[in-house]
Image: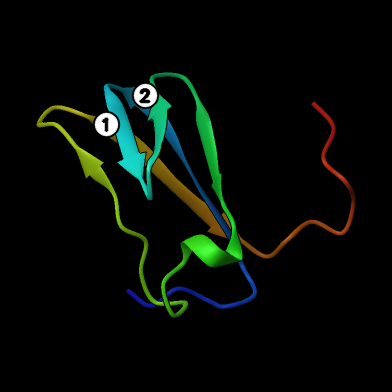
């Protein structure tokens, strides 16, 4: 799967934890990838233990600022 260069990407960890580029995302956390995290706009490197479950999300950036 090729990543779209102008899209935003993230993961939601539903079980376990995931590491990417020295950052750790734990269960029930949402991790947003920045342009620099997407190697050559083709891949994102993740490390996780067996049994970890994630939801990979992505799409065109929103035109409005996201407030949470």
Residue at image mark 1: 53
Q: How is the image coloured?
A: rainbow
Q: Judge left or right: residue 22 versus residue 64.
A: left
At a point 85% along the width and 32% down the height, the residue shown is: 67
Indicate whether 32 appears above or below 60.
above
| Number of residues whose C-alpha sits closer than 10 Å to that of mark 2, classed few (under 14), some (14–19) or many (20 or more) | some
The extreme right residue here reads 64
* Number of numbered discs: 2
Q: Quadrant of residue 32?
A: top right
> Real-space Cα distance between discs 1 and 2?
6 Å
Decide: marks 1, 2 in contact (CB < 8 A)?
yes
Residue depicted at 30% across the width and 57% down the height: 45
- Residue 20, given in percent of the width and then of the height, sits at 36, 46
State the quadrant of the N terminus: bottom left
Q: Residue at x 53, y 32 (%)?
A: 30
The x, y position of residue 59, in whole percent, is 60, 61
Residue 14 rendering spot, x and y as whole percentages? 36, 24
Extreme front residue here? 22
The residue that mark 2 highlights is 14
Q: Answer with left or right where residue 64 lies relative to residue 57.
A: right
Horizontal relation, residue 21 to residue 37: left or right: left
Residue 5 badge = none
**Residue displayed at 79% across by 26% down:** 68
What is the secondary structure assignment of the residue under circle 2? strand
47 or 7, nearer to the observer: 47
Label 1 element class: strand
In the rendered image, residue 15, in percent from the top left (x then y), is placed at: 29, 21
33 relative to 49, above or below: below
In the picture shown, does residue 53 fall above or below 5?
Answer: above
* Circle nearer the N terminus (1, 2): 2
> Within 10 angstroms of label 1, few (less than 14), some, or many (20 or more) residues?
some
């Amino acid at each position: 799967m090729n990543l779209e260069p102008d899209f935003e990407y993230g993961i939601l960890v539903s079980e376990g934890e995931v590491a990417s580029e020295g950052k750790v995302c734990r269960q029930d956390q949402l991790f947003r990838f920045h342009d620099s995290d997407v190697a050559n706009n083709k891949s994102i490197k993740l490390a996780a233990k067996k049994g970890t479950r994630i939801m990979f999300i992505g799409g065109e950036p929103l035109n409005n600022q996201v407030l949470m």
